[in-house]
Amino acid sequence: MTIKKAYYYLFYKLYKFSEAAPSRWLSDWKATFALLVLEIWVLLSFMVYYKVFTKKDLIPDNRLTIVGLTVVVILSLIKYFVFEHRDRWKECVGEFSSWPAKKNKTGTLIVWFIVLLIIANLIFSFYLMSQVNWKQYR
């Protein structure tokens, strides 16, 4: 499976999870938002790792808000054009819905493992950051 197809499958599983919720309203947008949040968490954990291991900020404090908002806007635009523009998400859902049940079950386990890995990675990066004596580096 290519990275692109795996990314679409992750969206598909998040979409299906949103569809299973009590409110099915805007499930495609909820899945897109969940994907955006996961990507931000991955980027945030890498920024924290960089800070922990180099003892330097990747982005200076006075620029953090501007850079952060820029990254969020760029990622949101990418998501919009990949999934929402001209309802491309429907093709994605249609393709993966036709997969055999066993293959989809295996995919579900892999997707939830990846989501849990991303969450655990973020928590671990914050744990590492809490272990550093920052007064020593100021």
Image (tube, rainbow, N blue to C red):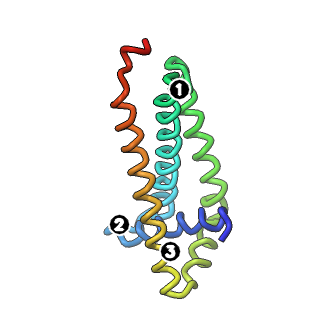
Q: Which residue carries the number 1 mark?
A: 54
Q: Which badge, 3 or 1, is on the more N-terminal residue?
A: 1
Looking at the rendered image, the disc whose residue lies closer to the viewer, 1 or 2, is: 1
Residue 46 sits above or below residue 96 on the image = above
Residue 116 placed where, x, y %?
Answer: 40, 58
Type of the residue with mark 2: Ser
Residue located at (46% from left, 55% from top): 34
Name the quadrant of the C terminus: top left
Q: Which badge, 1 or 2, is on the more N-terminal residue?
A: 2
Tell me which corner region of the image, top left, top right, bottom left or bottom right, holds residue 94. bottom right
Residue 26 placed where, x, y %?
Answer: 46, 62
Residue 112 placed where, x, y %?
Answer: 42, 65
Name the quadrant of the N terminus: bottom right
Type of the residue with mark 3: Gly
Would you say the residues marked 3 and 2 are in contact, meaning their CB atoms lie under 8 Å apart?
A: no
Q: Nearer the viewer, residue 56 or 27?
A: 56
Looking at the rendered image, the disc whose residue lies closer to the viewer, 3 or 1, is: 1
SS of the residue under disc 2: loop
Would you say the residues marked 3 and 1 are in contact, meaning their CB atoms lie under 8 Å apart?
A: no
Q: Which residue carries the number 2 mark?
A: 23
Q: Which residue carries the number 3 mark?
A: 107
Q: In this view, which residue lies farthest toward the top?
A: 138
SS of the residue under disc 1: helix
Looking at the rendered image, the disc whose residue lies closer to the viewer, 3 or 2, is: 3
Estimate the spatial distance between the alpha carbons at disc 1 and disc 2, rounded to whole Å. Answer: 45 Å
Residue located at (48% from left, 69% from top): 110
Residue located at (39% from left, 14% from top): 136
SS of the residue under disc 3: helix
Estimate the spatial distance between the alpha carbons at disc 3 and disc 2, rounded to whole Å. Answer: 24 Å
Residue located at (49% from left, 58% from top): 29
